[in-house]
Image: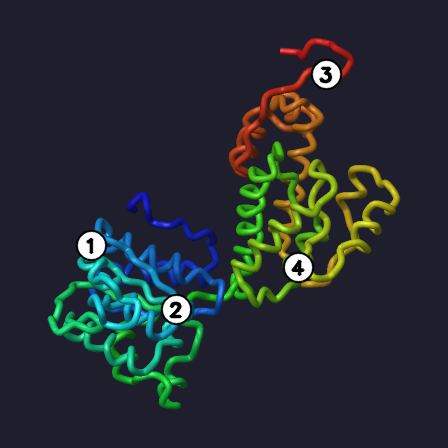
């Protein structure tokens, strides 16, 4: 795999099927349509398609059709000549010319006007177009990858999207599953975003999620999918009051006050380490695999903290052999930071 190919996290059957679909489509030099709800990673999928294709060493260009006004979008895609319209003081080279030989990714395609759709169809069919205000026909070799969260066949039935363009775009369609259908990937993604946020917050390590936090993550519907999960996880870590203990509160809605939850956590009676790990049973069903992994991670972190990051001593605290300890460290992608001197001025043991 090319080193620039984005790493899409997850091992669920639904995601694996989509990634396999992309891999099989990559070498076929045809237009591809990627569908999926907002936040499901359509841009990453388009990048993966490009870098797995024979065009991987050529330009990959992306543009969001909904973020640019129609008149500006036409100029951005096809370029314009000097004097083509008010303010066009010099020639502008469009994305199609700049991407010649490579892949052009058009996100939010459903927002494109019918007039621009007609011009886009001509480029796909014949590889030719004119700049805005120009007379010269230009030729390009560009692979088009488009993405949308809209139902394009329905829009075409309503006359709001061209059927002929849809036919040419959809040599094949890759559907990215929503996060709620990737239950087994949820915890892995949350862990990934948490570790990255810990680096930004300058934490020594990620303390893990408590059982109740995992249940909060599992119970949410995630309408914003992976993008929403990333924001929620980062916000929850930022708002935690004790970076040494597992995260207990997931802040899904930033507009609602977290005061009550924080006060409840602070005023809660202290429990022993064992009882704090065994919380009230959550609502069923649960992912036992995720719960066990989180518990294992939490106790591993505690043992390392109590042993001043010495893996030999942490292994003894957990009743493990050194080899078993090393295997757990690799499993959870952990490394020990340098040990600190004990309080009271005593020398750190070797």
- Of residues 98 and 69, the one nearer the viewer is 69
Q: Pointers 2 and 3 in contact (CB under 8 A)?
A: no
> To which residue does mark 1 refer?
54
The tag earlier along the polypeptide, 3 or 1, is 1
Residue farthest to the bottom, as pictured = 158
- What separation in Å lies between label 2 and label 3 (alpha carbons)? 59 Å
Tell me what residue is drawn at x 12 percent, y 71 percent. 137
Q: Position of residue 230 (x, y in %)?
A: 56, 54
Q: Secondary structure at mark 2?
A: loop
Q: Which mark is residue 342?
A: 3
Tell me what residue is drawn at x 74 percent, y 10 percent. 345
From this view, report whether residue 196 is shown above or below residue 204.
Answer: below
> To which residue does mark 4 refer?
252
The tag earlier along the polypeptide, 4 or 1, is 1
Q: Which mark is residue 96?
A: none
- Of residues 40 and 257, the one nearer the viewer is 257
Q: Position of residue 231 (x, y in %)?
A: 58, 55
From this view, report whether residue 161 is shown above or below residue 349.
Answer: below
Total labels drawn? 4
- What separation in Å lies between label 3 and label 4 (alpha carbons)? 39 Å
Q: Pointers 4 and 1 in contact (CB under 8 A)?
A: no
Q: Pointers 3 and 1 in contact (CB under 8 A)?
A: no
Q: Pointers 2 and 1 in contact (CB under 8 A)?
A: no
Tell me what residue is drawn at x 40 percent, y 49 percent. 7
> To which residue does mark 2 refer?
68
From this view, report whether residue 157 is shown above or below residue 202.
Answer: below
Q: Secondary structure at mark 3?
A: loop
The tag earlier along the polypeptide, 2 or 1, is 1
- Of residues 286 and 203, the one nearer the viewer is 203
Q: Position of residue 295 (x, y in %)?
A: 67, 43
């Amino acid at each position: 795999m090319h080193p620039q190919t984005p790493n899409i996290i997850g091992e669920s059957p639904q995601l694996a099927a989509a990634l396999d679909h992309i891999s099989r489509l990559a070498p076929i030099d045809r237009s591809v349509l990627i569908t999926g709800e907002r936040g499901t990673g359509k841009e990453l999928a388009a990048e993966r398609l490009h870098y797995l294709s024979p065009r991987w060493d050529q330009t990959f260009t992306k543009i969001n059709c909904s973020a640019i006004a129609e008149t500006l979008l036409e100029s951005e895609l096809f370029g314009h000549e000097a004097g083509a319209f008010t303010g066009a003081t010099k020639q502008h080279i469009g994305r199609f010319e700049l991407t010649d030989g490579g892949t052009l990714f058009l996100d939010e395609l459903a927002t494109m006007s019918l007039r621009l759709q007609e011009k886009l169809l001509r480029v796909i069919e014949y590889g030719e177009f004119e700049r805005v205000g120009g007379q010269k026909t230009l030729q390009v070799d560009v692979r088009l990858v488009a993405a949308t969260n809209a139902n394009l066949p329905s829009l075409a039935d309503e006359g709001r999207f061209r059927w002929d363009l849809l036919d040419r775009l959809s040599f094949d369609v890759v559907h990215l599953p929503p996060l709620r259908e990737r239950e087994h990937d949820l915890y892995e993604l949350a862990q990934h975003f948490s570790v990255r946020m810990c680096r930004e917050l300058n934490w020594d390590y990620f303390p893990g999620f408590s059982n109740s936090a995992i249940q909060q993550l599992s119970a949410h519907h995630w309408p914003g999918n992976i993008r929403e999960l990333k924001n929620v996880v980062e916000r929850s870590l930022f708002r935690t009051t004790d970076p040494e203990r597992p995260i207990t509160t997931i802040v899904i809605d930033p507009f609602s006050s977290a005061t009550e939850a924080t006060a409840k956590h602070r005023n809660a009676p202290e429990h022993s380490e064992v009882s704090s790990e065994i919380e009230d049973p959550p609502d069923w069903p649960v992912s036992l695999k995720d719960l066990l992994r989180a518990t294992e991670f939490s106790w591993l972190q505690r043992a390392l903290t109590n042993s001043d990051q010495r893996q030999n001593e942490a292994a003894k605290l957990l009743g493990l052999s050194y080899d078993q300890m090393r295997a757990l460290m690799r499993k959870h992608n952990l490394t020990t930071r340098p040990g600190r001197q004990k309080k009271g001025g005593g020398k750190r043991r070797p």
